[in-house]
Amino acid sequence: MKRPLAPTRDHVVVRWTLTAIALGFVGLFLVLPLAVVFHDALGDGLDAALAAIREPEALAAVRLTIIAAAIAVPLNAVFGIAASWAIAKFDFRGKGFLVTLIDLPFSVSPVVSGLIYVLVFGLQGWLGPWLADHDVRIIFALPGIVLATVFVTFPFVARELIPLMTDQGRDEEEAAVSLGAGGWATFRRVTLPNIKWGLLYGVLLCNARAMGEFGAVSVVSGHIRGLTETMPLHIEALYNDYQYSAAFAVASLLALLALVTLVLKSLLEWRFADEISAAHHH
Amino acid sequence: MTDIAATLPARRWRNPSALPGFGLSLGFTLFYLTAIVLVPLAALVIRPLEIGWSGFAGILSDARVLHALKLSFGGSLVAALINGVFGLIVAWVLVRYRFPGRRIVDAVVDLPFALPTAVAGIALSALYAPRGWLGAPLMEMGIRVAYTPFGVILALTFIGLPFVVRTLQPVMLELGRDSEEAAATLGATRFQILRRVVLPSLTPALLTGTAMAFARAVGEYGSVIFIAGNLPGISEIAPLLIVIKLNENNYAAAAAIGVIMLAASFVLLLGLNLLQAWSARR
């Protein structure tokens, strides 16, 4: 007698078909574009690629990208800690609404994220005339680039820490305070060690987005070569100049950053599964 | 005996807590949120009021604007549906099957989150250009991807996949096999189990993930503009039109299109919240 198929398992043909479809889709849509970046970066040889990265304008773009991220990421990390402390450790009305507002920047188009700052600080913006009179430049300068970067990476740390700290509750902090520890000591000695991997996870994603942001920064940058071009903007300029190999050489730096981010992120998910937000366990 | 409830103060907006730092953390959170997110967004919403309803309607009834909006929303819908189907398969394969390299594939799914959109944009463009690795064979088959709406859909599919997979995975893990085994002991076939037991449990997450992919795609800019070719009335997306209007110093038109996109993301966000509330009740 033929053994009946176990109805709780997919038939082997189904398993192989679905696996092939899934791997094919991931390979075609995700892996192949990544491979193209590195392949085309070396289109004119390794020396040409390295030379493109060492161009003064490319180096200026790398520097600006690092500066913008170095300001935006710590700001959003501090905000994320403050917001999750208020939301996870206290009960107050309107909490759900506040969390929705914090998530808001994720649902705004990158271009719109840049546009809103142009409407406030641009020449025809709310504060534009006043800023021009006082010789303060925000749009087409570093402050605008930082603001746009802060906006698009706004929720990363907060949305990682809020569920984590809510899950951890407030018993440990209450115990520390009842034993006489002050607020800062409680935070540093009790809360911070509990959330450090989650915080790192949030900072990692925040940084990847900050360094790679294109649309929002493009709107506020003004595209002045060597001055207000971040790496993604420099890649666009090279590409539009038909300097494909140079564009892909600079792009490969950002692709490497993405790969490092993915590796670290996966390591955190495997190694510290219990110490980062439960949403990432898989 | 005194009535305890009467001795307590009337319900306040927050419950008392032993922990310090509520005022500081919430105060900073609200200040930062207002300064970075709420005030600039208000500038966007208020701007079109200056040109009045007829001016607003005039901008939006322009054939070029209408086509761009149609392409952004229509293309995003198609891309989200593609991701709904393939995301479901990828998530199922990653959760249920064991094969070598599964963890690497799992990590690669996040690539669109980590890879800067400009890098993805030039990579897809190179891949599907008429002489690219995939563009050339497709051209021989008579299919042109680059510089057509297909290219737009392709880029939007690339950036949307992780939303569906990452929303489905935790639900699939939690689902376990108990209910499937129960259905099997009652004599259900594999197909009946999938259709009547598994799929209904996954529906809310599938809808949520697809809606998130759609929301992200509507506003996407960087990964699209290179492969799209940006031909007005053919492959020009709404976020790009905002950039074009800004470069023409037409703030009002840029803001009008921006407000439409913002309104759309609000509706989507609301819909997603309702969806999550509905699935939480199930």
Image (cartoon, rainbow, N blue to C red):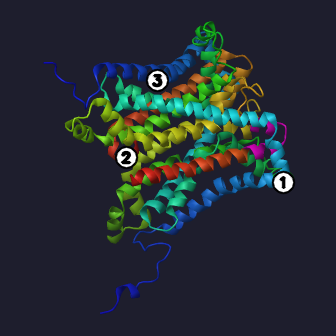
The one nearer the camera, B31 or A8, is A8
Rendered location of residue B106, percent (x, y): 40, 30
**Disc assigned to residue A26:** 3
Residue B247 lies in magenta, yes or no? yes
Are both tags, 3 and 1, on one chain?
A: no
Q: Is residue A127 visible?
A: yes
Density class for disc 2 (Cα within 10 Å; few <14, some 14-19, many ≥20) is: some
Which chain does tag 3 point to?
A
Residue A39 lies in magenta, yes or no? no
Mainly helix, strand or loop, the magenta region?
A: helix
Q: Which residues are magenta?
A: B239-257
Side of B87 relative to A222 (left or right) = left
Density class for disc 1 (Cα within 10 Å; few <14, some 14-19, many ≥20) is: few
Disc 3 or disc 2, which is closer to the eye? 3
Give the CA separation, mark 1 to mark 2. 48 Å
Disc 3 or disc 1, which is closer to the eye? 1
**Disc 2 residue type?**
Ala
**Disc assigned to residue B52:** 1
Which chain does tag 2 point to?
A
| Residue A42: quadrant of the picture | top right
On screen, B39 above or below A40? below
Could you tell me which secondary element the residue under label 3 belongs to? helix
Rendered location of residue B270, percent (x, y): 56, 52
Residue at image coords 71%, 46%: B260
The one nearer the camera, A256 or B241, is B241
Q: Residue furthest top?
A: B140
Could you tell me which secondary element the residue under label 2 belongs to? helix
Rendered location of residue A97, percent (x, y): 54, 60
User: Looking at the image, is mark 3 or mark 2 earlier in the sequence?
Assistant: 3
Report if the CB atoms under discs 3 and 1 are less than 8 Å apart.
no
Disc 1 or disc 2, which is closer to the eye? 1
**Disc assigned to residue A278:** 2
